[in-house]
Image: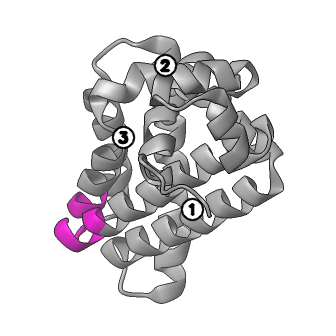
Amino acid sequence: MARPKTISDEQVLDALFGTLLENGPDRLTFAHAAKACGLSPATLVQRYGSREALVQAILLRAWDRLDAETEAADAEEAPTPQGAIDLLLRLMPTENAERDATNGLLLLREDIRNPVLRRRGAAWGRRLAEILSRRLSVDRKQGERLGWQMVSLWQGAHTWWAFTREEPAEQAIRRVLEEWVADLK
């Protein structure tokens, strides 16, 4: 008879996300993970099987959380171009800008290398572009094109902010997005 889980998988994976982000996927060990989540290394091996499977589970859980945040933002932000800007900035909180521009790239690298995670990221990107498209144009085709452009611009603005840091992240990214939206008119 299996023992009941005292800590759910979701709790474990949420606790381990910070450790993964801080140390990078390549440096995550069962010993590090055990310290971060309060379970023994043996229990983690029993649950996840391998370090690679644990990393994948952590990142899939992170995608689940991002999906939920994206859907909540879609439901709550205005169906306007300004709402699209607010939605994107909400998905990239400024208190995480430094972390996302540095350690977050290690996770992105893992997401791109792993086919399961890559498909998950692609699905989120398509959904985000569709959510933005409804805020940018009533014409479906044009909205789709503009949605993808805005997603790309948002990510590019964050990357270039990480290099220049001439102003606070939210201000820099918002300015770029607002200038782009103004040029649409």
Residue at the bottom extreme of this rendering:
139
Q: Residue at x 55, y 50 (%)?
A: 152
Residue 125, numbered circle: 1
Q: Identify the amino acid type marked 2.
A: Ala
Image colouring: one colour
Q: Earlier in the sequence, mark 1 or mark 3?
A: 3
Q: Is residue 25 left or right of residue 91?
A: right
Residue at x-position 80% and y-position 48%: 114
Q: Is residue 146 visible?
A: no
Gap between marks 3 and 2 measured at Cα: 13 Å
Question: Toward the viewer: 60 or 67?
Answer: 60
Image position, residue 157 (x, y; %): 47, 35
Residue topped by disc 3: 92
Front label number (1 vs 2): 1
- The crowding category of the residue bearing disc 3, from other C-alpha atoms within 10 Å (few below 14, some 14 to 19, many at least 20), is some
- Dot 2 corresponds to which residue? 162
Q: Position of residue 10 (x, y in %)?
A: 45, 52
